[in-house]
């Protein structure tokens, strides 16, 4: 009788707690990664916290957080997460690491995945990890961030960025979006969706930071675009015209388009493409449907169109995405894109 296969070792996430940190953001990695489990109910991540020294770390609230570990723990990490802090000093003001912070970051092994939440990106940028890379931070800090770190390609319009081994998020709750994205990237949609359900948050939020910039909130008597969105989700496989969406809310196309952007931060067309991409992801992960059928089911029409949109949104082809997230071994016949889609 063959011995039972041993589960793979847990991925170790080390969170760096800096003075002035936001307790909410400190808790995000522990909550999201800590809820990710495999089919047998085993935790997929081990999450630990360290500071620049063991002991109490002051927060922006009326309490401190006691941290057991010093910066040496960073040398054991597979992923390092840096939440925001309101006391970054020269890091924020001049883009320069303190000696203590530089010494701490020196423990990080080459190849370790680096993640920042909100203004934690200042730490990664000051250390040079973001040079030449696309990154984001809280929209209110984006201009200052770009001035301070001109070598970084700042994108203030997104909730998070993924540059492979370096990922950054916008403000506060966008850290949840980013951590869920990492779980999805590591273990697939089903695990990430389960974490989202347990945390009572959406597994994916539409739009970028634009929807959170201060703007008037529609009054209680103003119509919304909720009914049109529900109508669309039942018909993603069909051709969809803007006039049909506006008709669901008894609005003119112009009014509907303006209202939709106010409420979602994106145009109706961008939102529809995003929903089709999400449906394609589910089909690629959960079925062996041929690419042409996935394209029809998601409203992209052809495998070539599916490939174009998936690659633009996810940075990989549908075939590569399925290969990464499907649990089966060996490429199924359905994984092979038609020749027309490969050109």
Image (cartoon, rainbow, N blue to C red):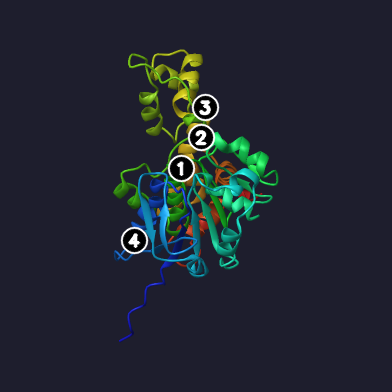
Q: Which residue, given by chain and number where applicable, does mark 1 sit on?
A: 174
Chain-order first, disc 1 or disc 2 = 1
Q: Residue 267 carries which label?
A: 3
How far apart are labels 3 and 4 at the CA level? 36 Å
Chain-order first, disc 3 or disc 1 = 1
How far apart are labels 1 and 2 at the CA level? 9 Å
Q: Which residue, given by chain and number where applicable, does mark 2 sit on?
A: 209
How far apart are labels 3 and 2 at the CA level? 14 Å
Q: Nearer the viewer, mark 2 or mark 4?
A: 2
How far apart are labels 3 and 1 at the CA level? 21 Å
Q: Are marks 1 and 2 in contact (CB under 8 Å)?
A: yes
Chain-order first, disc 1 or disc 4 = 4
Q: Which residue, given by chain and number where applicable, does mark 4 sit on?
A: 37
Q: Is 258 placed above or below 55 here?
A: above
Percent across and percent down for residue 199 are 32, 47
Q: In which quarter of the image is residue 111?
A: bottom right
Mark 4 Cα within 10 Å, few/some/many (few <14, many 20+)?
some
Chain-order first, disc 3 or disc 2 = 2
Q: Do the residues labelled 3 and 2 touch (CB within 8 Å)?
A: no
Element type where label 1 sits in the image = helix
Chain-order first, disc 3 or disc 4 = 4
């Amino acid at each position: 009788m063959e011995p039972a296969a041993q589960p793979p070792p847990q991925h170790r996430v080390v969170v760096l707690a800096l003075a002035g940190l936001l307790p909410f953001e400190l808790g995000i990695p522990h909550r999201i990664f800590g809820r990710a489990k495999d089919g047998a109910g085993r935790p997929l991540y081990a999450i630990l916290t360290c500071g620049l020294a063991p002991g109490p770390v002051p927060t922006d609230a009326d309490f401190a957080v006691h941290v057991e570990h010093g910066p040496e723990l960073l040398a054991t990490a597979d992923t390092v997460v840096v939440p925001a802090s309101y006391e970054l000093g020269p890091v924020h003001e001049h883009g320069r690491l303190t000696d203590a912070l530089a010494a701490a970051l020196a423990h990080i092994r080459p190849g370790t995945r680096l993640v920042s939440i909100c203004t934690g990106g200042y730490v990664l940028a000051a250390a040079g990890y973001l040079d030449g890379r696309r990154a984001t931070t809280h929209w209110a800090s984006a201009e200052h961030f770009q001035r301070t770190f001109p070598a970084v390609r700042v994108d203030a319009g997104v909730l998070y960025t993924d540059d492979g081994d370096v990922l950054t998020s916008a403000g506060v709750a966008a850290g949840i979006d980013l951590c869920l994205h990492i779980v999805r990237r590591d273990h697939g949609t089903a695990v990430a969706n389960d974490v989202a359900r347990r945390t009572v948050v959406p597994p994916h939020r539409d739009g970028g930071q634009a929807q959170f910039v201060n703007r008037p909130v529609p009054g209680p008597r103003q119509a919304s675009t909720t009914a049109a969105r529900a109508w669309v989700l039942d018909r993603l496989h069909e051709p969809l015209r803007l006039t049909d969406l506006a008709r669901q809310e008894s609005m003119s196309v112009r009014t509907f388009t303006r209202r939709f952007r106010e409420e979602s931060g994106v145009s109706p067309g961008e939102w529809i493409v995003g929903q089709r991409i999400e449906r394609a992801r589910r089909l690629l992960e959960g079925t062996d449907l041929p690419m042409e059928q996935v394209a029809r089911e998601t409203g992209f029409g052809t495998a070539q169109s599916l490939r174009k949109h998936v690659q633009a949104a996810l940075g990989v082809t549908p075939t590569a995405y399925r290969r990464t997230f499907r649990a089966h071994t060996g490429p199924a016949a359905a994984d092979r894109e038609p020749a027309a889609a490969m050109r």
